[in-house]
Amino acid sequence: MTDISASSAPSPALREEYLALVQRRRLYSFVLLVVFVALLASGFYVANERNAGGFIANIHQFFDFPAEVLGEAFEKAAEIPALLVKFFPSLVETVNIAAAATLFGAMFGAVFSLLSTRGLALWPRFTGVFRRVMDTMRAIPEIVIALVLIFVLGGGPIPAMIAIAFHTTGALGKLFSEVNENADMKPVEGLKSVGATWFQRMWLGVIPQVAPNYLSYALLRFEINIRASAILGFVGSGGIGYDLKNAITWGLGKYDEAMAIFILLFITIVAVDQLSSRARDRLIGRPL
């Protein structure tokens, strides 16, 4: 037993090699950290120099705008409930944009994910092509797509819905494909052995396994899309973001409207977050 223990102990040469490897990794990590900090500092310096006003020099004005909004909101606190009612239809439009975009994005994302998953793809040679398509869809920001569509279609909720759905397809397609890779292939093989088509194999053999995770990711994306829909309103895509832009643009005298919109957005996002979190917990079987 003594001989076995002695023979299993690492040799001094092996120990020295391991310590040298650890030191080399630490050195590389330190160099990367220094490079990252240098790039961060240089980027901040360049942005600060090109800005209309220096960040450091004007940092004392950081809270001026929130103070003006809160001050006017407190002065007109009695009008806030009526403004909440006034802007509620715009909030509904924003939520509808996000819901429609999430629905279409989830449907197309599911199709793209199945076509890009090895072992499930209808055309195995083109899995890489579908993956690159989804990468491209994720890489283009929603606001860029919305600006192009507004130029073509004009302002309104349709450009916002298409822009968000386009980006959502790429994002959910990537997440769905990772879920597909963990699916059990036995039902798919059984369906294939009895002559089922590719659509039947996916619908009956894969979707029942991955549907809870699909829905969980779609609900999470719905939360994100509500915020994206509100942001796109700033470029003329309708919804409550457009009203918020107008209120902020008018400045003093309209800050009570901006505060009412902030309150509506905050309540909506918190409510959707809580409801979707509970729904996701139920779908994946976690205790509430």
Image: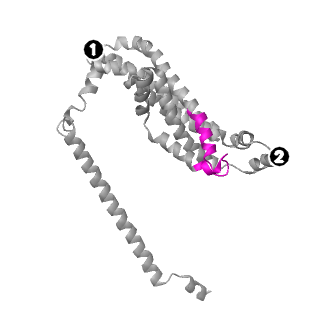
Residue 137 at x, y = what percent?
Answer: 49, 39
Give left or right: position of 170 versus 149. right
From this view, report whether residue 198 is shown above or below residue 157.
below
Give left or right: position of 212 versus 265. right
Q: Tell me, for residue 253, which label it has, or none.
A: 1
- Cβ atoms at labels 2 and 1 below 8 Å apart: no
Q: Nearer the viewer, mark 2 or mark 1?
A: 2
Residue at image position (48%, 28%) is 226
Residue 12 at x, y = what percent?
Answer: 45, 84
Residue at image position (34%, 22%) is 245
Magenta run includes residue 109:
yes
Seen from the viewer's position, the closer of residues 113 and 81 is: 113
Gap in angstroms between the C-alphas marked 2 and 1: 71 Å
Which part of the image, by quadrant, shows the N terminus?
bottom right
Q: Tell me, for residue 194, which label it has, or none.
A: 2
Which sits earlier in the primary sequence, circle 2 or circle 1?
2
For the record, the magenta segment spans 105-127
Give left or right: position of 178 versus 22. right
In which image quadrant can residue 191 be found?
top right
Residue 3 at x, y = what percent?
Answer: 59, 89
Can residue 287 be seen by looking at this rendering?
Answer: no
From this view, report whether residue 8 is shown above or below residue 104.
below
Residue at image position (62%, 51%) is 125
Seen from the viewer's position, the closer of residues 163 and 92 is: 163
From this view, report whether residue 75 is shown above or below residue 31.
above
In which image quadrant can residue 6 be found?
bottom right
Q: Tell me, for residue 49, which label it has, or none.
A: none
Give left or right: position of 63 versus 240. left
Question: Identity of the amino acid at label 2?
Answer: Val
Magenta run includes residue 108:
yes
Can residue 177 be seen by looking at this rendering?
Answer: yes
